[in-house]
Amino acid sequence: MINSTISQNIMDGFGTKYGVFLLKTMFQEPSSARFLAFCTFLLIYIIAFVGNFMLIVLIEKQLHKPVYIFLANLAATDLMGTSAALPRVMYNIIVENTISFPACFTQVLFVHSYIAMESFILSTMSVDRYIAVCHPLRYNVLITNKRANIVNVAVIMISYFLSLVQFILLLRLHFTCKPNILPNAVCIHFAVANLACEDVMINNLYGSMFVVLMFGTLTVVALFTYSFILRECLCVGRHSEKSKKALQTCLTHFMVLCFFLVSVLFIAISLRTASSKHISPFVRVLLDSVSYVLPPISNPIIYGLRIIRAHKMFPKCLFFKPCVYQCI
């Protein structure tokens, strides 16, 4: 009842009175269905949060090599990404299908920071694996803990700066001449900007540059590093121990990379299908949320399994005594 009343007020007054966006994808079903959806997303969020938190704690306690420092930053980024999206989605499912302007703009900042950080960290980890496989004797000289920490700080600062520009570009806009109905369950710069009264060419241009920079960098770096790693494996022989370890390293990182790219693809699909009347609200919310759920859930599992006997040693390493690990 509350949802329908607020929605009607926004439709009638174009959102000027309440200063909120109506989330088109949210549920209008009975409370029992919304509660089931809430529990589903809560379980997903808990799994993602606990998995990444345990990975960070494990690395902090036992693992102090550059590759694990990058991995810890990746886990922290996944925590931020899923926390920026899912709690608000759950709130909107249960309470009301609206979000205020400040909350939406803030979500844009953190969501796009998450995407940028994930992209840059995966690129950095690709370079790290390239040096470890192709230049093993120089690895300890080129990649140190200090340099890994510096790179992590640089990644965070650059990512937030790039996303802050989008945040500022949104602040200059007014949303008083159109129905403020967002097509997504999560606030995305492109979707929010298109509801503005002003010309948003600058927003769209910068948004396109943001996407090209993120995924262009990731794609080029991944192709470059993987091609050289594959060549190195072919040179030393496919059946050698070094080649097997290198291929395992590549496979692990490639799986994580694919999950991230697939999750971003879901954002594009959700934007494309937002106006479709043949897709239920629950499916739309899932399409939006997969982008902020798939990497945070898959990364701890994939990298955890790459730590020697991870499924048996997690409790021991976490609470009792030091353990021995192999390179992920």
Image (tube, rainbow, N blue to C red):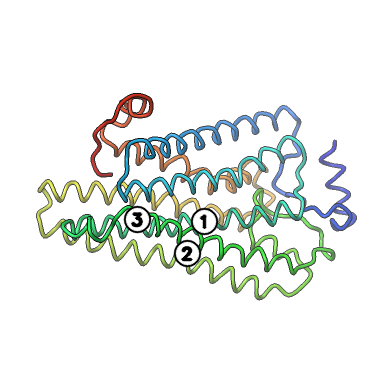
The residue sitting at 42% across, 36% down in the picture is 57
Which residue is the site of mark 3?
146
Q: Measured from the top left, where is residue 186 in percent x and y?
A: 64, 50
Q: Measured from the top left, where is residue 47 in percent x and y?
A: 50, 33
Q: Distance between the residues labelled 3 and 1?
A: 25 Å
Query: Tag 2: Cα neighbours inside 10 Å, few (<14), some, or many (≥20)?
Result: some
Q: Which of 161 and 112 is in front in this view?
A: 161
Mark 3 or mark 2: whose residue is earlier in sequence: 3
The residue sitting at 76% across, 39% down in the picture is 28
Which residue is the site of mark 2?
214
* For residue 302, side relative to residue 228 (left or right): right
**Which amino acid is tagged 3?**
Lys
Residue 164: name its quadrant.
Answer: bottom right
Q: Measured from the top left, where is residue 311 in percent x and y?
A: 33, 28
Q: How far apart are marks 2 and 1 (CA)?
A: 8 Å
Which residue is the site of mark 1?
115
The residue sitting at 32% across, 57% down in the picture is 126
- Marks 3,2: beta carbons within 8 A: no
The residue sitting at 47% across, 37% down in the picture is 53
**Which amino acid is tagged 1?**
Ile
The dot on residue 104 is none
Q: Measured from the top left, where is residue 304 in percent x and y?
A: 35, 37
* For residue 176, side relative to residue 113 (left or right): right
* For residue 250, side relative to residue 199 (left or right): left
Classify the position of the C terminus by image quarter.
top left
- Marks 3,1: beta carbons within 8 A: no
